[in-house]
Image (tube, helix red, strand yellow):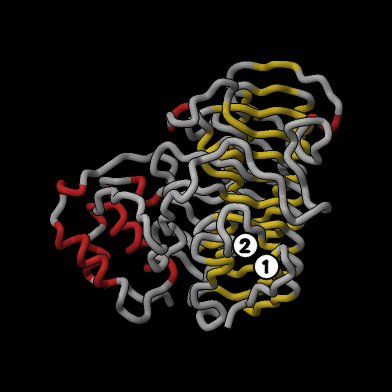
Amino acid sequence: MRPRRSRVLAGTALALALTAGAFAVGLQAQTTLAADATPLSLRDECRQALTYPGRTTADRAWLNQCVHALTAPTPTPTGPAAPPPIGPTATAPVTNPPTTNPPTSSAGTGFPTAGDTAAGSTGWRHTGVKLTLRTGLIRVRTGGTVIDSVEARDGIQVSADNVTIRRSLVEGGNSGPGAGIWIDAGVRGTVIEDVEVTSRPGADPSVESAVVDRAVTARDTVATVMRRVYAHRMIRGLEPGCDTLIEDSYVDGEVNPGGAHMSAIGTETCAEFRLTVRHNHVGLSPNKENSSALLYYPPQVGAYSAQHTTIAITDNYIVGGTYCLWLSSDPQFSGTVVVTGNRFGTEYYPNCGLYGPLFTDNLPREGHQSITWNDNRFTNGAVVNGPA
């Protein structure tokens, strides 16, 4: 059973309720709370509570959010990087300006490439189709619908099962339906294939409401497939559901004009959580509030029961973020984690991520997950060590 949170965890609830940005990994809305609007001691209590033994991953993430919410922004440090914070929403200092032009993979050939031209391997351009412009949010309410060769200028919302979106360009701004592709919770069988997802033409990357928050939102969906997706010029990338396959896709070139905690591929787990991420370019460009390029984590709000996982992360090119890869643990996790054949890039940081290539929380010491770790290397051939 999940350990009970201490009094300080309960005492911070009001402060965190006032700043939805503190739960940006789990919520779409964001507001701001001035640091001087709440007692300093509350922030210090959160910091102190992080040092107590026996905290779960969710507790540590929650407490880091508390500290972040009650701390005024500080200047980017100019000296060596500070030790990493203790939660999946670690804040990375901006060491390079945000980019809207993701770098070419230094890993050589064989990995998915950006779909900016017909020579790319992702998005719609390489298919050779001509797009038909559609304005206004496209709401799909009929099961089995196929959307093909469309420029969806104001996003797509999927509310029915077995919908296919293919060979299309999807644009939008801000969060919620109308921002990229939004799949309603509980929807089954969505296939997104040969699709580019980005912000609207001319969107100002310094204005939060002008750019897409998440390219694809699929939380709590089932049997969702994202194949050859090209996601760029957005705040956050692909959010898998409870049962998701992501393959042959390219995610990179994020921007963050606000305070969202970012990932290229990231989601909460479910009671039965199946995630396969294979043969993708997974990049998280340097921005403030970076999390990991690829991560999953326990539910961040409310109580939850056992989480059984079947996770396979294979043959990907991963680069950027605080850590390139974050494998979460929790006392209530059981199942398998397979991480094989991945390559860790160095375009953004010499050690792949700001703090390193991998963070495994307390895996496998916490919970009951078995882990297979094999042939994971930097692009120069050096071995990336797995969980100790």
Considering the image in quadrants, where does the N terminus appear? bottom left
Give percent across and percent down for residue 39: 13, 55
Q: Which of 348 and 147 is in front in this view?
A: 348
Q: Residue at x 20, y 65 (%)?
A: 44
- Horizontal side of 60 relative to 122 (left or right) equals left
Q: Do the residues labelled 1 and 2 touch (CB within 8 Å)?
A: yes
Q: Is residue 162 visible?
A: no
**Where residue 121 sits in the image (x, y, percent)?**
81, 41
Q: Nearer the viewer, residue 265 or 350?
A: 350
Mark 2 sits on what residue? 273
Q: Which of 72 and 77 is in front in this view?
A: 77
Q: Is mark 1 on a helix, strand or loop?
A: strand
Nearest the viewer among 62 and 117 is 117
Would residue 54 be visible to someone looking at this image?
yes
Instruction: Quadrant for residue 47, please give it.
Output: bottom left
The amino acid type of the residue labelled 2 equals Phe
Q: How crowded is mark 1: few (under 14 residues within 10 Å), some or many (20 or more)?
A: some
Looking at the rendered structure, the kind of residue marked 1 is Thr
| Numbered mark located on residue 7 in the image | none
- Ranked by sequence position, the earlier of labels 1 and 2 is 2
Few, some or many residues within 10 Å of mark 2 (<14, 14–19, 20+): some
| Residue at screen point 57% across, 53% down | 348
In this image, 100 relative to 262: left or right?
Answer: right
Residue at label 1?
310
